[in-house]
Structure formats: structure tokens, C-alpha cells
Image: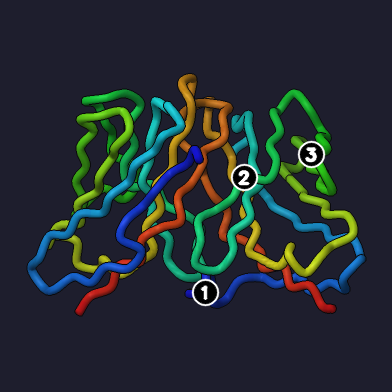
Amino acid sequence: DGGITQSPKYLFRKEGQNVTLSCEQNLNHDAMYWYRQDPGQGLRLIYYSQIVNDFQKGDIAEGYSVSREKKESFPLTVTSAQKNPTAFYLCASSSVGGSNQPQHFGDGTRLSIL
Amino acid sequence: GESVGLHLPTLSVQEGDNSIINCAYSNSASDYFIWYKQESGKGPQFIIDIRSNMDKRQGQRVTVLLNKTVKHLSLQIAATQPGDSAVYFCAENYYSSYKLIFGSGTRLLVRP
């Protein structure tokens, strides 16, 4: 079954702790994305990657880091520098050519502060 | 599941009626538009897309209309069903880039 898998579904972070959210896709897509969703708002882009070993900051990258060592995987680390990490985090991917192609989403990770 | 948005505009329709969800987009240079459906606690699900060289596109029970003159997008759902209840987002593709800009969403409630 092709798709995007995000884990864990729920995650809790302590003060001063870094946490990593997993995103794996088996769609053979080149481009991958991380978004943050807050209540009453649309999605905001954190980071995106068009190819392996390359990624760019989105609109709200401060306090986050990513890596893209494999085509299938695009993990997001929420660092202690992110002072308001509580949100719903969504990973997406799109096929090569990126533009004018739909992005397909996983089912998200909900991050909360303990 | 968690609410996607607590203070979203809400459209309430009777089961079987047609629904029209509207979206104003921000940039006249955007050339690709997508509608997504998001159920509580899940990620957005692709519904339909349209390119700027078109003004209408139809799918199964859904139609998207694009009016570039007034930067307006609409999603029409025919014979709305209870399973259509969700939050609907429009997204625009900015300057043919990889970046999508999302609207804040509209909640659709279907009354039985």
C-alpha cells in the first residue's frame, strides 16, 4: 500500500528536550515537506527537500532541523529552541517536477509539551 | 480526534443538497490550485486540482471553478453526504515553485 507514514501519532516533549518526528514514503517521490498546523489556521511550511542531501527553509524554520539522507525518509527534529512546539505536524511528498503536482500527506504527529 | 480548527467558517448543508465552498487566493501569479479535505485527526486528502489555463474541472461529485479576474476558487460538491463532513482547504502554487500556500479552511457540516 503506497503512502506516507508518520510516527509517532502522539509525542510529548519535556522542557529543553529535542524530539524527532519520523516521515517515510514509498511513493518514489523526490520532494518532501514538513508543515505545522495550529488550530484555526492553515498549514505553514517548515522545511522542504527537492532531492536527497538537499533541503531548504520554509516560512517558519526557526527552532527546527531536518535531514534527507535517503529518498524515502525526511525526519524533522523539534529543538529546544522552538519555544512554542505544541502543534499538529504534517509531512507531505510530491513527485519529481514538484511544481503543478499535488502534495500527498501523512496522518500527522501531534506534539505537546509536558 | 483533535479539531483541525476551532474557529473556522462553517457551512452547514442538508444531506443530498449541493455544497459550495469558496476561497479567495492571494497571488495573481499563482498558476496551480488544489482542494484538500481534512478529517479530524488526519492529514489533508487530495480532492481535485486545476491549472490556471482552465476555469473549470470536474471530478467525481466535485467541480472546481477558477475565476482569475477576482482571484476566486470554489469547490462544488454534488449530493452532499455525511462522509463529506470535514474541513476543506484550498491551496495555491506560488510562481510554479514547490511551495503551496494554504487558506485557513472551511468546515463543512452535513445535516442528516
In-front residue for pair B2/A65: B2
Q: Quadrant of the C terminus of chain B?
A: bottom right
Looking at the rendered structure, whether the residues under marks 3 and 2 are on a common chain is answered as: yes
From the top left corner, tell me how far across and down residue A114 is, in percent.
Answer: 20, 79
Q: Amino acid at mark 2?
A: Phe
In the figure, is residue A90 to the left or right of B24? left
Within 10 angstroms of label 2, few (less than 14), some, or many (20 or more) residues?
A: some
- Report the chain holding disc 2: B
In-front residue for pair A70/B31: A70
Mark 2 and mark 1: span between their CA atoms?
19 Å
Looking at the rendered structure, whether the residues under marks 3 and 1 are on a common chain is answered as: yes
From the top left corner, tell me how far across and down residue B30 is, in percent.
Answer: 60, 32
Q: Amino acid at mark 1?
A: Ser
Which residue is located at x 36 percent, y 46 percent? A34
Within 10 angstroms of label 1, few (less than 14), some, or many (20 or more) residues?
A: some
Q: Is disc 3 in contact with disc 2, using a CB cutoff of under 8 Å?
A: no
Q: Amino acid at mark 3?
A: Asn
Which residue is located at x 92 percent, y 65 percent? B17
Which residue is located at x 77 percent, y 39 percent? B66
Residue B36 higher or lower than B57, as above or below: below
In the figure, is residue A81 to the left or right of B48? left
SS for callout 2: strand
SS for callout 3: strand
Residue B69 higher or lower than B107, as above or below: above
Question: Which residue does the numbered mark 2 point to in the structure image?
Answer: B46
Looking at the rendered structure, whether the residues under marks 2 and 1 are on a common chain is answered as: yes
Residue A61 higher or lower than B1, as above or below: above
Question: Which residue does the numbered mark 1 point to in the structure image?
Answer: B3
First in sequence: mark 3 vs mark 1: 1
Within 10 angstroms of label 3, few (less than 14), some, or many (20 or more) residues?
A: some
Question: Which residue does the numbered mark 3 point to in the structure image?
Answer: B67
From the top left corner, tell me how far across and down residue B21 is, in percent.
Answer: 76, 58
